[in-house]
Image (cartoon, rainbow, N blue to C red):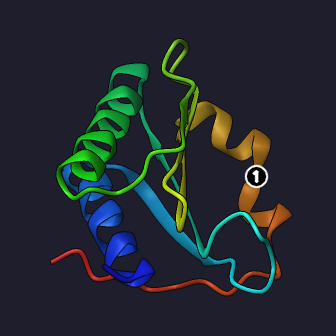
Amino acid sequence: MTAREELELIVKAADDKRAEEIVVLDMEGISPIADYFVICHGNSEKQVEAIAREIKDVAGENGLPLHKFEGMDTARWVLADLENVVVHIFHRDDRDYYNLEKLWADAPHVEVEVG
């Protein structure tokens, strides 16, 4: 599976749980951490948890490596490191505070169809 196919699976999983304002950044050549960053948010801790669980489940079902999965204890910022794709799932109230889109403003945005 290509990194792009992994990205599409992850974005669809987030969208299936109604993640808000899904942004995909192309990190190739900008960060050695991953090819893509996915940034999204939920409107409550329960929704953040649901989005994160769905991404974890989809990763497991498709044999994607899950190197790190942290933040579920508070569900304010959950990080899922899937090697090629790093997912940041914020609580709505915390997304603007951390403003990762501004931090990585030089990264091109990627459009992903969710079906």
Residue that appears at 28% across and 82% down: 113
* Residue type, label 1: Asn
* Front position in the image: 86 or 113: 86
Q: Position of residue 40 (x, y in %)?
A: 49, 53
Residue that appears at 37% across and 27% down: 49
* Residue at far top of view: 73
Residue that appears at 25% across and 55% down: 13
Q: Quadrant of residue 27?
A: bottom right
Q: Is residue 43 above or below residue 87?
A: above
Q: Is residue 34 above or below residue 66?
A: below
Looking at the rendered structure, the secondary structure element under dot 1 is loop
Q: Quadrant of the C terminus?
A: bottom left
Q: Quadrant of residue 22?
A: bottom left
Q: Is residue 79 above or below residue 76?
A: below
Q: Position of residue 80 (x, y in %)?
A: 51, 44
Q: Which residue is mark 1?
A: 99
Q: Is residue 40 left or right of residue 60?
A: right
Q: Is residue 10 left or right of residue 35?
A: left
Q: Position of residue 78 (x, y in %)?
A: 54, 34
Q: Quadrant of residue 74?
A: top right
Residue that appears at 44% across and 79% down: 3
Q: Quadrant of the N terminus?
A: bottom left
Q: Residues within 10 Å of mark 1 (few under 14, many from 20)?
A: few
